[in-house]
Image (spheres, grey):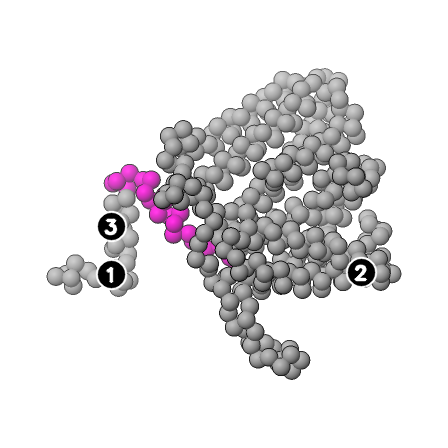
Amino acid sequence: MIVLCVQIKCFHEIITIGYSVYHSYHLPWFRTLSWYFLLCVNYFFYGETVTDYFFTLVQREEPLRILSKYHRFISFALYLSGFCMFVLSLVKKHYRLQFYMFGWTHVTLLIVVTQSHLIIHNLFEGMIWFIVPISCVICNDIMAYMFGFFFGRTPLIKLSPKKTWEGFIGGFFSTVVFGILFSYLMAGYRYFVCPVEFSNDSNSFTVDCEPSELFQLQDYTLPSVLESITGWTTVKLYPFQIHSIALSAFASIVGPFGGFFASGFKRAFKIKDFANTIPGHGGIMDRFDCQYLMATFVNVYIASFIRGPNPTKVIQQLLALRPDQQLHIYNSLKAHLTERGLLCSESEMV
């Protein structure tokens, strides 16, 4: 719900800038259509997420099962309705302006809604994949400011004249250290590392599991340089702490470019902030410009290096098939395992 509220507010701030810049207050139906497209896209993404992560719950409830089965068709029909409404609302003297705003709305949906949907996916993998990346971005923001304030001399980029190389480098090292320490703290709690699942036994959502190897302490041999400094030959770490270095590095090296992009956007339209929602800090989008980019990286990182095949989801999908389909898969799997020598053939059993 928090992610949804932040998403809606960010969408509102960017769309409002479009209205004010293009003087589009008199465009027929455009405010209504902008929010309608937001509703359609959220319906699609949240429906996909619920079906993917809570397949068992969806199959148990008849209305949800029907909605899940025809979800993409319903989503497309909703969007198509909005598209037709837009075409019907075109007015001769506003053609160009209306298409400007149509593109503005869709780019905003791509930047804000799509990336906030990835935040939801990260959340369902475990709270640690949500809290640690967000905290790394916040830490880098604070430490880059501190190092820049006390030691800053060399300008970093023209888009943000106050940003310095000293702040950029100091923020990087501080964020990496923070990420390793904070990850160690959080990896010890199941509530933060376990994914959200629906339990048939308790008929409720649970956050409890046997932590994977990623969140179990392991011995790592230190390089000779560090061994000579510390006197230790091995050190106990969670494997997630190794991954946190990649997350911290992205938050401090690439993450700030989300802020630079936002700065360039605001300069292009001659505005200081996206809104005045937070006194002294501007709008919600001013605070989340780096977070969206970070969330996308985390989602891609999980899909590329962390997530593997999920046996639970495969079994859930198999149980939803017809009996003849289940038997066909059973016989195919049995033949495959027998061929590989993992199961005894019927002649050997006799």
Quarter of the image for residue 251 reads: bottom right
Residue type for callout 3: Asn
Left or right: 220, with 255 as reference point: left
- State the mark number for residue 147: 2
Q: Which residue is mark 3?
A: 331
At x 52%, y 73%, the residue is 219
Q: Is residue 155 left or right of residue 84?
A: right
Outermost residue to the left: 350
Instruction: Tell me: residue 262, above or below residue 234.
Output: above
Q: Nearer the viewer, residue 52 or 241?
A: 241
Query: Spatial distance from mark 2 to mark 1, Cα to Cα?
Result: 63 Å
Residue 250 in which image quadrant = bottom right
Split into 4 quadrants, where in the image is the C terminus?
bottom left
95 versus 142 height, above or below: above
Return the mark for residue 343. 1
- From which residue to which does the magenta span run? 305-325
Q: Looking at the rendering, in which quadrant would you find the N terminus?
A: top right
Q: Residue 345 is drawn in which quadrant? A: bottom left
Magenta-highlighted stretch: main secondary structure? helix
Residue at 87 percent across and 61 percent down: it is 153
Give the SS element for disc 1: loop
The amino acid beneath tag 1 is Leu
Above or below for 271 versus 308: above
